[in-house]
Image (cartoon, grey):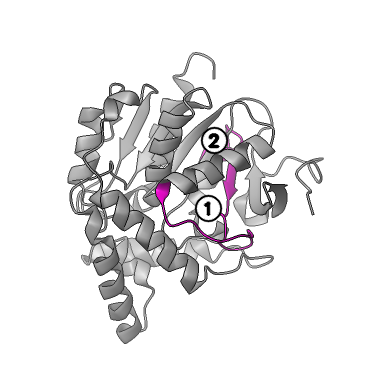
Amino acid sequence: MNDADEGRGDVTTSYRNAPTRTVTADGVTFAYRELGPRSGVPVLFLTHLAAVLDNWDPRVVDGIAARHRVITFDNRGVGASTGSTPGTIEDMADDAVTFVRALGLDQVDILGFSMGGMIAQVIAQTQPRLVRSLILAGTGPAGGEGIKNVTRISHVDTLRALLTLQDPKLYLFFTRTANGRRAGRAFLARLKERTQHRDKAISLTSYFSQLKAIHQWGLQAPADLSHIHQPVLVANGESDRMVPSRNTLDLAAGLPRGELVPLYPDAGHGGIFQFHDEFVARALAFLEARPDS
């Protein structure tokens, strides 16, 4: 079924209530949600390892959608999207481009978090006319410091979470300080605000394919970031264990038009969620600095 053009009579303002739609292209049916104004260049959200539609912080989505059209989607083979999940970041980028083209879009801004930031970098280089600007959070360049260790860290913290009956994101996304634990619990509570028509969890097969893709990204030769000519806003927490924060500094320094958000204090991989108010304000200012916004 393709309902990309249906159900748009009213503007959706809350991610909690955004309907899940589908669009089919190249034999894959992509599940997606959109909200916010219909005019202007949309902001495409590219998500993290193991994430489905329900893993986006509604404070970040709603904050951006207050002034911009926001589109989130499930990668191929993930959640409610069909097909098999690719084992490379490059193939995931191709899928994202296929999805964008299926919606009839000629240009997007991209907010890529973690694995999504890796995918965004590839799209910016292979489809430069499609991407107006980038926001990269909790991510790093190909061959970046420590990225090859994501698999080990994910396994260790998932086991730790199982033994302590907690969500792995409390360990992977947040510091273990009092502030970090409090921010993690608040984040998980926000993810549960949507109570109806929730997405399906990622399968283990897809999860391991994504881990393989990130591992390969980390083993690549160091990236030449000079080929990314779009304006890029770069953000992260100061204590990211998954994609070490050094990568954020390297991105900002290596990108010709990179702009660094000072690293969020006492924050880890999920720094943009812990400091969602500050991040949204900075992201909106960045997006609206574009002359054709």
Farthest residue toward the top? 291
Horizontally, residue 56 falls left or right of residue 30, namely left
Q: Quadrant of the C terminus?
A: top right
In the rendered image, the vertical position of residue 73 relative to residue 182, given as above or below: above
Tell me which amino acid carries mark 2. Answer: Val
Q: Nearer the viewer, residue 69 or 5?
A: 5
In the rendered image, residue 4, in percent from the top left (x then y), is placed at 75, 44
Q: Which residues are magenta?
A: 63-89
Report which quarter residue 212 is drawn in.
Answer: bottom left
Camera-nearest label, 2 or 1: 2
In the rendered image, the vertical position of residue 29 relative to residue 231, given as above or below: below
Residue matched to label 1 = 58
Specify few, some or many for label 1: CA neighbours under 10 Å numbering under 14, 14-19, or 20 or more: many
Question: Can you see residue 237?
Answer: yes
In the rendered image, the vertical position of residue 163 relative to residue 262, given as above or below: below
Residue matched to label 2 = 43
